[in-house]
Amino acid sequence: MKILVIGSGGREHAIVRKLLESPKVEKLYCAPGNGGIACDAVCVHMQAMDIPGAVTFAKKNEIDLVFVAPDDPLAAGMVDALKEAGIPAFGPRANAAILESSKVFSKNLMKKYNIPTASYEVFDNSQTALEYIKQKNQYPIVVKADGLALGKGVIIAPSYEEAEQAVHSIMEDKVFGESGNQIVVEEYITGPEVSVLAFTDGKTLKPMVSSKDHKRALDNDQGLNTGGMGTVSPNPYYTEAVAEECMRTIFLPTIEAMQKEGRPFQGCLYFGLMLTKDGPKVIEYNARFGDPETQVVLPRLKTDLVDILMAVVAGRLDQLDIEWSDEPAACVVMASGGYPQAYEKGLEISGLDEYGQLEGVTIFHAGTKMRGIGKFVTNGGRVLGVTAMGSTLDEALQKAYDGVAKISFEGAHYRKDIGK
Ligand code: AMP
Ligand code: GLY
């Protein structure tokens, strides 16, 4: 098969790596890819949001399957366009990707179908929102922009003043553009967070092994929120009993709800969960694989990924058994100095071999570029995901951190407490 992966981060590198293990893959393309992906697949000069470009490329190169990994092309209808052109595509259509691209939609869906989540109100007017917040008078309170906001659209306000600032910057200054036309004001809930990715063809849902993301930039969950600074799998809080409860109260009700709404969800559905004292609740849905969750989940997959993708696309996931390795995995993200704020690009990375790898670990490239043969430079906020498996989580973490110690670039920073 000829497969095209859309995207350019560490998640896409982990997908490319797993696809390469399949004997069914004859040719692998990635658009636009990155420095590390270029060692494993043919990188195509095409932006991830180029929908007509993806259709044209897939037709011209007789692509058998397109894997659309990032949120924005999914929300913009890339899968719809591919399917209409007769090209098999993995990922939800835009009318199902809305589960991630509109928090108002997802919150209202959960309310309608009794799926546990934090209580909330929706506002399209800042004045009414502020009156509500004042009247509620409970802090912290959570303010969320409705639409996609590069993972920055959630503000946890410890006081009225900060909530007011959040509402103003989202609804009036439009810091997230149209994504801020509506907001969700939400009750603050607490508990350990768990990420669960699941394959679904719209009718059948098969959860993958669980994982734990570390979203804050600095150790001990200090500093700004990021896309994710590291992950471990499995998530130690996600016991079998919790998994069973989530399946019954959250996962199956969600795909049934989407079916009833005439928006069957096909692809990877990501459940961002919080295990509260009142049971597991949904913090957010994503319509795609997580980054850097994928980097610890897919290495544990034993079943041929191509078989799973084809079963999802054909709507016959019920006929497939999916097997996972018992070995835990850990991923430590090495980020550019300054990330998640402004950072420099083009800094030379040392410690990697000519394929951008290192013995003893797997390096998933996130923001890198190849400069000359076997030379890599930084090209993004999150630069590398240094990943390892082990017979215990401690062993996996030890291997990953041993890898990190051998790699350097100017200003590099990483968390020292992943998995702790
Ligand atoms: P999201 O972008 O929706 O994943 O939110 C980012 C982070 O904000 C989550 O991982 C949580 O840690 C936190 N968060 C979101 N909603 C709530 C809530 N209702 N209560 C407490 N924390 C929240
Ligand atoms: N790591 C969180 C996400 O992919 O949304």
Image (cartoon, rainbow, N blue to C red):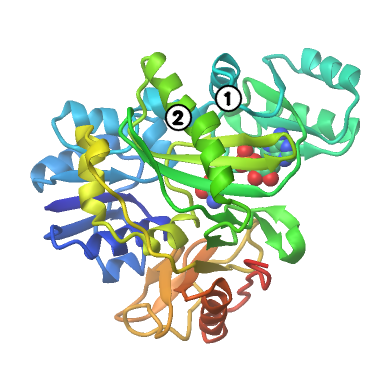
How far is mark 1 from mark 2, CA to CA? 10 Å
Q: Is residue 139 left or right of residue 64?
A: right
Q: Position of residue 25 (x, y in %)?
A: 15, 58
Q: How many other residues sit within 10 Å of disc 2, few (<14), some (14-19) or many (≥20)?
A: some
Q: How many other residues sit within 10 Å of disc 1, few (<14), some (14-19) or many (≥20)?
A: many
Q: Are marks 1 and 2 in contact (CB under 8 Å)?
A: no
Question: Residue at position x 52%, y 87% from top?
Answer: 406
Residue with the mark numbered 1 = 115
Front one among 62 and 110: 110
- Say whether disc 1 or disc 2 marks the residue closer to the N-terminus: 1
Q: Under tag 2, what secondary structure?
A: helix
Q: Position of residue 37 (x, y in %)?
A: 32, 65
Residue with the mark numbered 2 = 252
Q: Of the residues shown, which amino acid type is indicated by label 1?
A: Ile
Q: Would you place residue 333 above or below residue 115 in this image? A: below
Question: Residue at position x 77%, y 27% from top?
Answer: 168
Q: Under tag 1, what secondary structure?
A: loop
State ligand 1's quadrant.
top right
Front one among 7 and 92: 92
Q: Of the residues shown, which amino acid type is indicated by label 2?
A: Leu
Q: Position of residue 163 (x, y in %)?
A: 82, 31
- Determine the image quadrant of residue 19: bottom left
Question: Residue at position x 28%, y 33% from top?
Answer: 79
